[in-house]
Amino acid sequence: MNLFFNKFLSNLPIAQPPSISMRGNRYSTALQGPDKDTFTKADGVSDISFTGRRSNGSTKKGDVLKELDNITCPYSGVKMISSKKMDKIERDIRQCHNIHERIGVLEPYQKCMQELEKEVFTILKGYEINYPNRTMNDCFNELKPQCWAELRIDEFKVLDEVDKTSNQLDAKTALEVRKITTEARKKILEDKEDQIFKRKDLLAKIHEVTQDCPNQDIVDEMWNIANKLPKSSNNFNAFIVKYADRSPDEISARLLRPSTASIEHIRPANPHSDKIESGENDLTNFMLTSRDWNSGRGNTPLPEFIERHPNIPRYSQMYINDIMKAIKKGKLQECDWYPYIMKETLYSESNGLIDLNLDRYHISEGEAFLDAPENVREKYNKLLEQNTAKRALIS
């Protein structure tokens, strides 16, 4: 048993989540979501429920995309799970009584899991072989002491780097930062339920004491370091610590939720700069991406996001290939124009880094736009004219 866990916990590869751009809108994305950084069960959490299917007004026009299933995420490359299928999976999960039954429900969707979730699922499958009638919590609680110790070390390493960088600030600000990191270390070591360390609280306090600091380049550097504090979305130890006391239903659903399909604004609806036009709440500006990568990009400009994740152009081609297959099967009706406008929209927004190949598409450009809405044709023609000029310059 110990040999099994040691094998997986030593040198366990952990996938890095989407990075978050801090300039211009430094704190908005990093501080959202109360469950991102808290490693204790939230009060009142009793059952699981997936809310991905409920659209707000800004993405309502993208609901036609959310009906699609088994579409490649253009950011992560995994096959996404539709909200409808996720609802069914969660119903099946609630009927399970032990880890063996839960593994049976989840295993067909292992290919859909993000890298960290795959690593956790691998651990659970190994545990299930020896203890099929136990629970996921039993597995996590055996791992928790070691994971918690390693998590604290990881947190301390980041806090040390924050302190080191703060030395480049004025003495008064540096002292205030040291007070914050010292308080954080104390909470990490004491581990009191009423004073648990929360990553987002530390970030908020650092923002408060540095927002008027004249040397914002150093503040940005320190902020980016602080954002490397482990969290359950990108760190194995943090995942185990956070979910060890959660219900088996919640743990099971959590392994797939990051891969559920969500509507992404290709051009952000709330860009960093006032000089950049906001993206439209329209299908011409929407594509499906997995939930956590959508959140991870935030308002980051697409070229900057691609620089951090260079596989995005390749995954985007896989995305549009899946879309074209879906249209051929009779899905995404009355939207035959969608692949064409995606080609031009992504080319424009990525500054030419994404140039989709539509040679396999069975519908010609003329046929695709025959019954397209007037505003769609106008936008496509405008984008095509702009991009044709750009392509000519590149060639």
Image: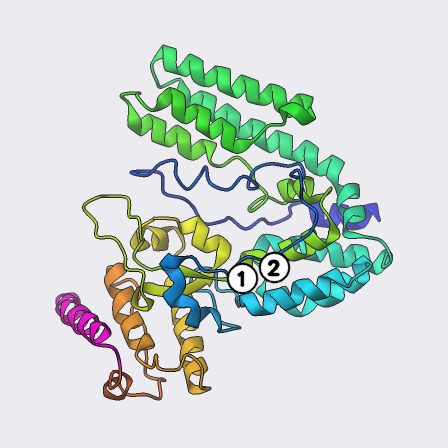
Rendered image: mark on residue 260: 1
Point 39% across, 74% down: residue: 320
Q: CA distance from mark 2 to mark 1?
A: 7 Å
Mark 1 Cα shell of 10 Å, populated few (<14), some (14-19), many (≥20):
many
Q: Position of residue 77 (x, y in %)?
A: 48, 64
Magenta portion: prevailing SS class: helix
Residue 173 versus residue 81: which sits nearer the camera? 81
Tags 2 and 1 touching, CB below 8 Å: yes
For mark 2, what is the residue?
256
Q: Position of residue 133 (x, y in %)?
A: 87, 57
Residue 244 versus residue 224: which sits nearer the camera? 244
Mark 2 Cα shell of 10 Å, populated few (<14), some (14-19), many (≥20):
many
190 lies above or below 304? above
Q: Which residues are magenta?
A: 372-395
Point 13% across, 66% down: residue: 393
145 lies above or below 210? below
